[in-house]
Amino acid sequence: MKFRSPVLVTSLALIAYGNAIAHHPILGKFDDGARVHIEGIVSYVDWRNPHAHVFVNVAEAGETLNWAVELGSPLTLEASGWSRETLLPGDTIVVDGLRARDGSRQVWGETVTKGAGGARLFALQTTPRISPAASRPTPRWPDGSPALGATPDSSSGYWSYPSKTALVEDGVEVAMNAYGLLETLDDAERVAPFKPWALALYRHRQQRQLRDDPMYLHCKPPGGVRQYQSDFGFQLIEDRESERIFVLIGSGNRNFRIIYLDGREQVGLVTGDDDNPLYYGRSVGRWEGETLEVDTRGFNEDFWFTEGGLPHTSQLRLTERFTRTSLDTLEYAVTVNDPGAYTRSWSASWTLRWVGNEDLPAHFCQHNRS
């Protein structure tokens, strides 16, 4: 059993630190320029959200030191073949990954192998399943209107695998990872039409590697458009009798929002009321042909409304458009109007994939253990 730091090691990269399923930007905590290799014996497995941890006793310079190996969410690990019994105390493992920025004995596990033979322990599933060979028609209700989710005579499922995982104005091309972390900070001003203070705050959050994300630090919900940028997905449950749609959110403690279709007035308090769940705003919608158009307002400022840390104020108003173009594809488009943070309104769009015959994953933010 041994430890080497910070030598660069050849990594199989079974857990990619840029993948979108992870629940917080790990580069705020781990240094991709300081890779480590540890070999040791498992002492404890902590199978909890937002990330599972494996604690490993490593022999170094005549003493035994305990390391914490951080992995993905238990939901992600289970989807890749893990279970609570995959690793048990007493197992010997080899880990390659990224060292914690604060120099503590923590490592983000990129590659994990088990046993003296070095057998590969698992391969993280980070890509969508293969698309159907042919487009399947949009499911419809008896009156011919499109169904945004499952119908009583169709299989269950949810929407996931967004084609974009961070908010950028349509037509703008900037290099960023799945968390919305820019490759080049000089591109910050191109992402959206910021007011000066908002650009300064956005740059500050970027410079800190997104480590101030309140969803990670304080379990704040993924409000705004962020609920549509996670591979944990969301469900649209249409209550046609009561003229409302429930949006069930896989990435936030069984949180949900309601889209009202009964023609009610757009009112609500930023401080909250029965119809306004603070982080998700108050939403009223109507059908425009095949597209559901939703007006959402009444947000507080206590969360990040998108990956990457774009600022917003309580003046934020989102105009969302949902169009199911086939059984397997949902087109989502949003216009952002926040005169407190941006010089003009602006728009972004992406698509999502239908995951059929499966229940919506339930992710619970327990504590960040950072």
Image: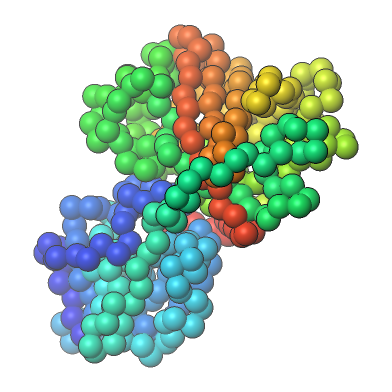
At a point 44% along the width and 81% down the height, the residue shown is: 86
Residue 340 lies, with reference to residue 54, above or below; the image says above
At a point 83% along the width and 20% down the height, the residue shown is: 263
Front one among 90 and 127: 127
Q: Quadrant of residue 260?
A: top right
Q: How many numbered marks are there?
A: 0
Front one among 102 and 4: 4
x then y, percent, for residue 193: 40, 14
At a point 27% along the width and 82% down the height, the residue shown is: 119
x then y, percent, for residue 228: 54, 39
Q: Is residue 89 visible?
A: yes
Quarter of the figure with the C terminus: bottom left
Q: Is residue 313 visible?
A: no
At a point 25% along the width and 62% down the height, the residue shown is: 13
Q: Is residue 182 left or right of residue 243?
A: left
Residue 169 lies, with reference to residue 276, above or below; the image says above
Quarter of the figure with the N terminus: bottom left
Front one among 167 and 327: 327
x then y, percent, for residue 64: 27, 84
